[in-house]
Amino acid sequence: MIVIETNHLCKRYGKDRGIIDVNLAVKQGETFGFIGPNGAGKSTTIRTLLNFIFPTSGEAKINGLDCIKNSKKIRQIIGYLPSEVNYYDDMNAGQLFKYSSNFYKKDCTKRINELCEIFQVDKSKKVGEMSLGNKKKVGIVQALLHEPEILIFDEPTSGLDPLMQKMFFNVLKEQNKKGTTIFFSSHILSEVQEICSRVAIIKEGKILKTDEVSVLRNSQFKKIMICLSEENIIDISEINIDGAVNIKIEQDKKNTITFLYTGKIDDLLYNLHKLKLSNLLIEEPSLEEIFMHYYEKEEVKNDELI
């Protein structure tokens, strides 16, 4: 079952670009990553899903409900954490949680207490007196307190220390095991790689690629590092291997070259035998390296059209 769906979703701000023809389909129970740098269109997509802003064209649905016509029903089943949290400064955390829980037809007291213990939230402290990290923890509790079917997070870990980030990911994994669908927007690729099973890559408002994390990492690319012997320092332009992309000389190491490779290892070894190597490393690339490849490929495509 598809629980978050957009079809040719567009949002423009006058002549300025927001998002362009965004098509997403998030399945029930999956943790879906939405990755791209700041300004790529992640927050605009989320705000359109939540009916905070109206689309220029296209449509968006959550649980089969139209995000404009049925936004009130949708908000009963989702938990949302924005990238920047802003609450009533003169309220303490406990008052805020009680106020928030009144919007849902259930007693949230037990879950609030559990979450406050996990994230070390002082319910007696006023929001206006809290640090950025503590405000973010309050936002996390507020998003989770009613045990929603769907969680939507926009850059959720900014301001959290490493220990709290780990606790946060553990809680998300537990929620996902219970069947909660998680839409996780971030520009920090290591986070997405840790918890998400499938990702969409967005750049300048357009989706470049949607695929399983395992497919992106394992099936298409290998990260290759070659160390040339000292007497065989060559120019990077001399590296001519079919299937090699993102060829780079390591900074301060003129004899060390790295690249992503999409081809047969036998063919790679045949091509490399012409070079005098002191070392060779073949490993799985990180999601970040693959992500940058897609971005650089898109830039080359755009340059060719100009």
Image (cartoon, grey):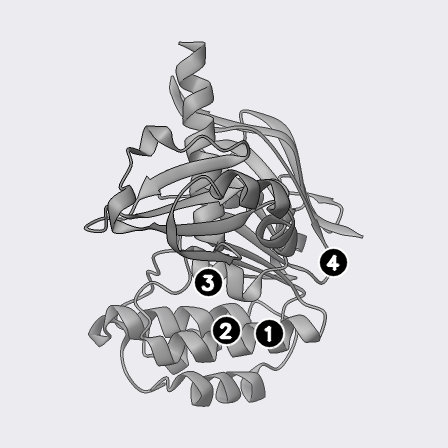
Q: Nearer the viewer, residue 23 or 144?
A: 23
* Of the image marks 1 and 3, the number of the one nearer the N terminus: 1
**Residues at marks 1 and 3, CA–CA distance in whole angstroms:** 12 Å
Residue at x 48%, y 51% (from the top left corner): 223
Callout 1 touching callout 2 (CB < 8 Å) = yes
Callout 1 touching callout 3 (CB < 8 Å) = no
Left or right: residue 60 versus residue 125 is right
Q: Amino acid at mark 1?
A: Lys
Q: Element under label 1?
A: helix
Q: Relative to 296, is 211 above or below? A: below
Q: Give the labeled residue for mark 4.
A: 28
Q: Is residue 119 visible?
A: yes
**Residues at marks 4 and 3, CA–CA distance in whole angstroms:** 21 Å
Foreground mark, 1 or 3, reads 3
Q: Position of residue 101 (x, y in %)?
A: 54, 74
Left or right: residue 253 versus residue 169 is left
Residue 5, picture quadrant: top right
Q: Element under label 3?
A: helix
